[in-house]
Amino acid sequence: MKNLILFFTRYYYFFLFLFLELLAFLILYQNNNYQQTKIVNASNQITGSVLESFSTVQEYFHLKATNDQLARENAALRNHMRTSFFILPEKENPVSDTAFKQKYKFLVAEVVNATSHKRNNFFTLNRGASSGIQSGMGVIAPSGVVGIVKDVSENFCTVMSVLHDKVAIPVIMPRYRETGILKWDGSDNRFGHVPNIPTHLDLKTRDTILTSPSSSIFPSGVLVGTIEEITQVQGNTFNNLKVRFSTDLKNLTHVYVVNYLFKSEQDNLESKSIYGQ
Amino acid sequence: MVNKIISNLFRFVGLTLLQVLILDNIEISGYINPYIYILFIALLPLETPDWLVLVLGFGLGMTIDLFSGTPGMHTSATLLGAFSRKFLLKYLEPRDGYSSVETPDLKNMGIRWFLVYTGLLFLIHHLCLFYVEMFRFSEFFRTFFRAISSLFFTLLFTFLGQLLINAWKRK
């Protein structure tokens, strides 16, 4: 016993290191299980408020670009206004508002912290559970898809950007109704990749890629990007597409969180059919 | 003694804020990112007890992790850096010992010694950090290249900072 204590006190430096390092890896491992850590997170209240106050300073640098973006979006929304439409004779096309039920709600949020040069990238937004945000909601910008909400605290949430290992977005090539999965390979933050697209489709560079209707996270038809390069896999009948993201993920200031109002209904029904009896 | 604690505390806060508010937003040619906060571990006074270096390394890594939302990643790398500091100091000890030196910085130890010391310490930290971030060896050389190129910028910032502080003190 005495020798054992002597042994430990002699090499305490190494054992202390081993203990702390194991602790660090334990935290790391816990984080790798999706949506498990709630304690240590960038959506934390303290770090969140520090980052937010710094972000208010940074906002001034983006003022001009943000104004331009808002003006462009106002113009786009104006196109959807009632007054911009020609009203057809009622007899032929009876339109009743009760025929529509709201399916998506959009909530504007501000980016308070962002990374774009790590292997797995995150955004922190200044909206949280108090604004009705839940884990798993989609996030889009006026120019396209941004990411998926990961953790939520009272007033902040973290978003896994499309530049994240675990984010895969179901996409569609509108001309052929061909679907695929878009992922990021970790190299260049301007481009994503869609593997396994059959070679018989006559795809062209600069064709647009949209979100697929099969996604229950994003509304269908949100812009993802344009095809930059098509490469055929050696000895295979599939193409790999290199897609240029339509959103500049390095300079985002304002985004929209998508609340799909029927999500729980759809998910419940689907899981009942697949797993339940 | 109290003076030293206060100056190190300021360095801790200063380097942390510099890292999370400014350097984490800098992007040099795609994916190079300097991690200068590890300088705090390098510049701890020589008389700091061994266990305290480890605990401070853990705390520093944890703080950076809190801000960047990567629990455990910076902690494990910083801890490895803190652990290897003792052996680096022993290995690089000058022939006549550290006699009257209190802090192993650029001014006290000279440019060559400091370059080797920080170079080795930062290399250990950066390699650990980048490989833990990847968590697989499939992109071995690309990760290696990222670590080395980031190391270069970290060293550059370290030396610029040290020279600036020396010039400011001399005034």
Image: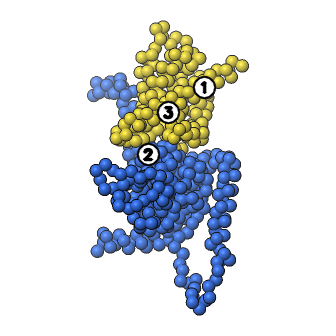
CA distance separating discs 3 and 1: 15 Å
Query: Are the two marked residues, 3 and 2, in contact with CB atoms closer than 8 angstroms?
Result: no
Amino acid tagged 1: Leu
Which chain does tag 3 point to?
A: B
Q: Nearer the viewer, residue A47 or B133?
A: B133
| Residue indicated by mark 1 | B160
Which chain does tag 1 point to?
A: B
| Residue indicated by mark 2 | A186
Can residue A41 be seen by looking at this rendering?
A: no
Q: Residue, x 37% and y 37% (percent of image)?
A: B140
Residue sitting farthest toward the right: B171
Residue A21 image position (x, y, % from top left): 39, 36
CA distance separating discs 2 and 1: 31 Å
Amino acid tagged 3: Ser
**Chain assigned yellow:** B
Question: From the viewer's perspective, is residue A99 above or below residue A194?
Answer: below
- The image quadrant where one finds the N terminus of chain A is top left
Report the side of A142 relative to A41 (left or right).
right
For marks 3 and 1, the one nearer the N-term is 3
| Residue indicated by mark 3 | B150
Residue A65 image position (x, y, % from top left): 66, 52
